[in-house]
Image (cartoon, coloured by chain):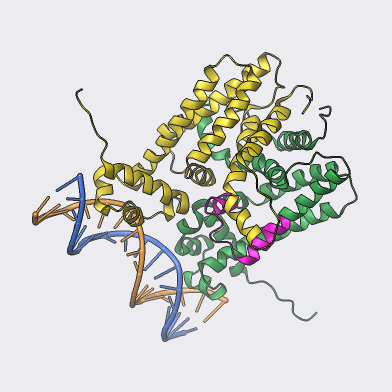
Chain colours: A yellow, B green, C blue, D orange
Amino acid sequence: MPEPRRAPASRDRILQAAAVEFAARGYAGAGVDRIARRARINKAMIYYYFDGKLALYTAILRDVYLPVGDAVAAIAATDASASAKIDALVDAMARAVDERPHFLPILMREMAEGGAHLGRDTLLLIGRLFNLVGGIIADGVRTGEFAAVHPALAYFSLIGPLAMFRASAPVRARLTGLGIARLPDVDRDMLVGHLQTTARRMLAVAPEPS
Amino acid sequence: MPEPRRAPASRDRILQAAAVEFAARGYAGAGVDRIARRARINKAMIYYYFDGKLALYTAILRDVYLPVGDAVAAIAATDASASAKIDALVDAMARAVDERPHFLPILMREMAEGGAHLGRDTLLLIGRLFNLVGGIIADGVRTGEFAAVHPALAYFSLIGPLAMFRASAPVRARLTGLGIARLPDVDRDMLVGHLQTTARRMLAVAPEPS
DNA sequence: GTCTATAAATAGATAGAC
DNA sequence: GTCTATCTATTTATAGAC
C-alpha cells in the first residue's frame, strides 16, 4: 500500500479547535491565538498548515458542507416517493445539525454577514445542497404529490424551524433558568416528527390527514 | 411645555451607525472606531453617551425588541380568533424584520453565540415576545382551533422560515449571480401569504382547505 | 514539524484641552 | 458636547532557531 498518508494529528486538532472557536465567536471574533491554545499547539503551526485565518475557515466549511451534500444526494438518488424523500431529508438535516454542533452557529452567522467569507468553492457546495432539495420538490410537483410552492420558500420553510429551534437552545435554557418562560423539553423524535408533519402539510396539494 | 428634551442628533447617529456595524460584523467584529467614523462623530463621543461597547449594543437590542413586543401585545389583546391573530402576528413579524434591516442579523448572531451578550433586561424583552406568542397559541388550543403543538416548536416554526428566508437574501443573490442556482424573486405579499398558509396548516387540528 | 520571539496593525477605552 | 492625543492590550502574521 503506497501512501498510507496518516493525517497529522496537529492539523486535525487545529480544525476541530477552530470549528469550536468560529462557532462560539464568529469569524471576526475568533482569535488565532485562542484556536492555538485550544488545540494545544503553537500558533505558528496554524500558519504552517493553513494559508491564514480565512483559509482555515474555508476548510471547515468544506468539511461540513461536503458530507451533508453527499447525504442529501444519496436521498435524492433513491426511487422513493417525493414525500418519503422529504421525510428522509428532514431526518438527515437534523442528524447533520446534531452531529456537528459548530455547523449551525457558523451557518447562521455567515448568513447574517451576507456570506462575506464565502468563496466560490463554498458557494458551489451550498448551491449544490439547495439544488438537490429543489429537485426533490420539483419532482413532487411534477408527479402531483406537492403543490407548486416556490423552491426558496419551501427550502427555508424546511430548514428554518430546525435551524432556529436548535440554535435557540442556549437562549431558551437561559429563559427557563431565569423563570422568564416555561419551555418543556423536546426530544429528537418529537422535533423530527414535528418538522416532517409540518413539511408534509406545507407541501400538500390538498390537506391530508395528520 | 417643560422639558422639550430634544434628543441629541449625535446620540441617534451613534445608535444608527452602531446598528449597521453590529449587524454587518457582529459584536466582536464591530469596531468602535468604525462606528464613530460611520456616525461622523468622534470616537470619544460614544463613551460620552454610552458606558462602552456592550452598553451600546444593549441599547440597540432594547430599541428593537421593545416596539416589536408592543406590536405583538396589541395583536394578542384583540378579540379576534386565534388563527386571525396568527395571521396578524406573521404580518407584524415580517414588518418588524423589513423595517429594521439590522434586526435579523443581530438576532441570528446572538442566537449563534448562545445569547452571550444578552443581559437580564434583554432576556426579559425576548421572553415577553415568546410568552405573547405562546399565549395566542394556547388560546387557540383551548378553543379547539389549534392542535396541541409544543409552544417552542410552534414559535420557531413561525419565526424560522421568515428569519432564514430574509437573512439568506444576500447569499441567494450571490448564488443567482454566479449562475449556481436559479431563484425567482419573491415579493412581500407572496412571502407573507406563504408563511400564513404554512402556519395555519401547521396549527390545524384537522387539515383545512388551502 | 514544532518552537520562541517579535513585528506591525488595530482594538477598546480614557485624559484633558476647549 | 466635541475634539486630539495617547495608553494598553490584543490582533494577524512571520522570521528564524532547532
Horizontal and vertical percent for residue A123?
Answer: 46, 33
Q: Nearer the viewer, residue B4 or A113?
A: A113
Main SS of the magenta segment? helix
| Residue at 90% over, 50% down | B79
Horizontal and vertical percent for residue A186?
Answer: 65, 44
| Residue at 78% over, 81% down | B2
Q: Is residue C4 left or right of residue B200?
A: left
Q: Quadrant of residue B124?
A: bottom right
Q: Is residue A114 left or right of residue B154?
A: left
Horizontal and vertical percent for residue B29?
Answer: 46, 56
Rendered view: B73 above or below B51: above
Q: Does residue B180 show up?
A: no
Rendered view: A73 above or below A20: above
Tell how many labels. Answer: 0
Residue B114 included in the magenta stretch of the image:
yes
Q: Nearer the viewer, residue D7 or B205?
A: B205
| Residue at 57% over, 25% down | A133
Horizontal and vertical percent for residue B133?
Answer: 76, 50
Q: Does residue B91 show up?
A: yes
Residue B75 included in the magenta stretch of the image:
no
Q: Which image quadrant: the N terminus of chain B?
A: bottom right
Q: Which image quadrant: the C terminus of chain B?
A: top right
Q: Quadrant of residue B206?
A: top right
Q: Nearer the viewer, residue A186 or A65?
A: A186
| Residue at 53% over, 29% down | B176
Magenta span: B106-129
Q: Is residue B36 left or right of residue A43?
A: right
Q: Is residue B49 left or right of residue A182?
A: left
